Image: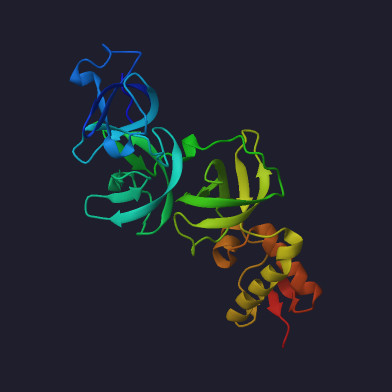
């Protein structure tokens, strides 16, 4: 039985001018019937291959939707996840380079964000209702690995694969491990497929990672303080909210978590750049 989208070990049934026919030694009648054979094109036939030899190949559909074998190694297989480059954006869908002569289609209904030619995006491979192999950007969270070797404080590299709105930003560390940037962090300048340098802030009991684009607090504090100082100046020297505001208000106005905002205010106060009198955060006259 042939398995589309997977590697199989098949045997040579017959050699012809345009390649060799392969069959599954565990099924059929030894490749006697045409329905039990699959073609390996001549340009991919290894030297000295002869009838009866066994060969590991990958099975997919060619441009005419015919089952065909290849000795080339695709960048993704059925049920797996990989980062692929966008080759074309067309009216019928997105075509991805997966290492074979026929590009892999990403249908528009399987898209979760805008992509452009040249982008490298994370997808999974599935078989559509017509039996063809296709790519999807959906439900990647469910198939991410959770057995990463990383621990709190580690620096990692992660690719954005979906903006989760209220939940945060979904990231695949090493294009493989499940991770999330918290919702209060500003990633408005980021795009689907973008690779970020991140720091692990927490490893959850289920193995998923919480990560941040920010430095450790003692390194980030000066940068945050400068940011808050600029915001105070934009409000004519008096901030219309304090560190007692809700985390949602602080995040919306500053792009910082409540704790980061409080640390930044503390740093500015110690430098005597602001006052905290009368329940207001005021800029000291410069």
Q: Residue furthest bottom?
A: 286
Residue 239 versus residue 178: which sits nearer the camera? 178
Q: Is residue 133 above or below residue 252?
A: above
Residue at left 72%, top 58%? 216
User: Which quarter of the figure is the C terminus placed in?
Assistant: bottom right
138 sits to left or right of 88: right
Q: Position of residue 54 (x, y in %)?
A: 39, 22
Horizontal relation, residue 229 to residue 135: left or right = right
- Relative to 144, is 118 above or below? below
Residue 103: tell me if it is visible.
yes
| Coordinates of residue 172 in the picture (x, y in percent) | 53, 46
> What residue sits 35% from the left and 34% below the top?
126
User: What residue appears at the point 46 percent right and 54 percent down from the top-left corner?
Assistant: 193
Quadrant in the picture for the N terminus = top left
State which quadrant residue 258 falls in: bottom right
Residue 6 appears anywhere in the view = no
Residue positioned 30% across, 40% down in the render: 43
Q: Is residue 49 above or below residue 29?
A: below
Residue 45, percent from left and from top: 33, 34
Where residue 24 sits, quadrant-wise, is top left
Q: Is residue 193 or residue 235 the one in the foreground?
A: 193
């Amino acid at each position: 039985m042939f398995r589309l989208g997977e590697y199989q070990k098949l045997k040579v049934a017959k050699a012809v001018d345009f390649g060799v026919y392969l069959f599954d030694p565990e099924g059929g009648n030894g490749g006697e019937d045409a329905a039990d054979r699959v073609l390996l094109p001549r340009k991919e036939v290894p030297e000295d291959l002869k009838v009866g030899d066994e060969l590991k190949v990958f099975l997919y559909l060619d441009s005419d939707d015919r089952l065909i074998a290849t000795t080339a190694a695709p960048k993704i297989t059925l049920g797996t996840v990989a980062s692929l480059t966008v080759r074309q954006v067309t009216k019928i869908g997105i075509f991805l380079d997966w290492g074979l002569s026929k590009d892999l289609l990403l249908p528009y209904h399987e898209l979760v964000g805008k992509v452009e030619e040249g982008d490298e995006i994370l997808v999974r491979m599935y078989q559509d209702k017509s039996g063809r192999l296709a790519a999807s950007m959906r439900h990647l969270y469910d198939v991410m690995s959770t057995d990463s070797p990383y621990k709190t404080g580690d620096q990692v590299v992660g690719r954005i694969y979906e903006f989760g709105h209220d939940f945060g930003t979904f990231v695949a560390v090493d294009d493989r491990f499940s991770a999330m940037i918290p919702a209060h962090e500003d990633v408005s300048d980021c795009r689907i497929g973008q690779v970020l340098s991140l720091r692990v802030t927490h490893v959850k009991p289920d193995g998923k990672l919480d990560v941040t684009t920010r430095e450790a607090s003692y390194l980030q504090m000066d940068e945050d303080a400068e940011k808050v100082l600029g915001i105070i100046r934009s409000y004519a020297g008096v901030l219309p909210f304090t560190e007692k505001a809700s985390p949602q208000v602080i995040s919306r106005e500053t792009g910082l978590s409540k704790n980061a905002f409080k640390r930044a205010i503390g740093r500015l106060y110690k430098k005597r750049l602001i006052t905290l009198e009368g329940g207001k955060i005021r800029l000291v006259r410069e």
